[in-house]
Image (cartoon, rainbow, N blue to C red):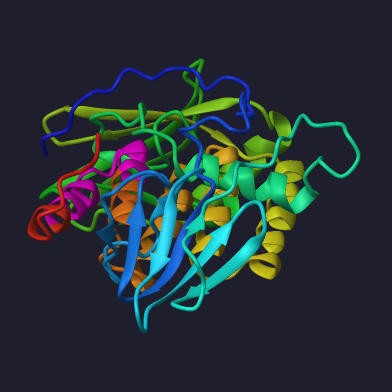
Amino acid sequence: MNLTFCRPIILGMLLVRGLTSANASDSPAGVIEYVHPPVFWSKNASSKTQTPLDPDQDQGRRIYSGEVVRCGRGGSVRLFVLAVGEKTLTDRNPPYEIPLLPDIGATSAGTKPDDWQIKFMKALDSYGEAGATLGGQSAVYSPPDNGAVEVSGLVIRWVPSPGYVKVQIQTLDGQDLWVADGVDGSVGQLDSEKVRHALRTYQAQDPRGSLVLSLTGLKGNESRVMFSLLSPASEKTLAAELAYWDTQAKGLMRHVGRAYAFSHYFLFVEAAAEYDAALLEAPRSRDLLEKAVQANHKTGNFVRENSLKEILTREEQPIRP
């Protein structure tokens, strides 16, 4: 089994990524949910170039303040716009300029955004972030290196390879929490209640501790990831956030919101799965494909990452810089 070693990095405190500028040009102001052509997009109101929107590739497309959307004869489009919520346009509407983002720092009466706008703004900001910087060369991608896991749902996953492997979970000081020899490496996963029980026991003693999972082949080649356990308190908070997105959003925005919630708690595997689920609704969406590539890179699941890149290549849609 050809496993590579990835030096673990201690997972620090959770950092909430705030919006430094509500009207920053790199922060999406909304997303395109549905396109019935002909519908056209322009960079701004003064642009003479009008680009037709593709009903498949532009579904899930991020839109930004100042851009203009116009429907041709018989065309219609449904947008989610932070400033107003859901917005449907037809050929009876004039060209629609995407409004500025709500200013989350405003204090004047009537100018401060509602709570829902702040939530959706942060979710869209995460959707518009540049490529992931995490993701190592470890064969293990669940748990993700430098990520977190919910004990109740943990399934150990790795890139399948012939032969047997040893799976070991230790504390940072080398204390064994769980060890199994002779695991079939070709299966690529280990769904074990014994593992989860061992982690629950450890969690009750040290809920903030980081752990190391190692996968060792017959020739002694080793792959390692470091991860932390989501605390019971954080699990409850996360459940409430997911319930919010399930009830207050629909379609693609529901997936974007849920993925943001998972990422906020460093649950990179679950976030990637959410983008994969969104692709079932919009399998040719350019922006969703790119975000799914980034999300799977963040987990270290380079097999899934490469398969998504192949889809982009077949569609002749190179990844945007």
Q: Is residue 146 left or right of residue 20?
A: left
Q: Residue furthest bottom?
A: 74
Residue 132, above or below 288:
above
Span colored in magenta: 294-310
- Residue located at (15% from left, 46% from top): 318
x, y percent for residue 77: 44, 72
Q: Quadrant of the N terminus?
A: top left
**Magenta stretch prevailing secondary structure:** helix
Number of numbered tags placed on the structure image: 0
Residue 206, above or below 188:
above
Closest to the observer: 158 or 25?
25
Residue 25, above or below 36:
above
Residue 172 on the magenta span: no
Q: Is residue 73 left or right of residue 308?
A: right
Closest to the observer: 107 or 192?
107
Q: Is residue 217 visible?
A: yes
x, y percent for residue 90: 47, 77
x, y percent for residue 124: 54, 46
Residue 296 on the magenta span: yes
- Residue located at (51% from left, 40% from top): 126
Q: Is residue 106 left or right of residue 11?
A: right
Q: Quadrant of the C terminus?
A: top left
- Residue located at (51% from left, 23% from top): 175
Res 299 → quadrant: top left
Residue 97, above or below 199:
below
Closest to the observer: 60 or 144?
60
Q: Is residue 191 visible?
A: no
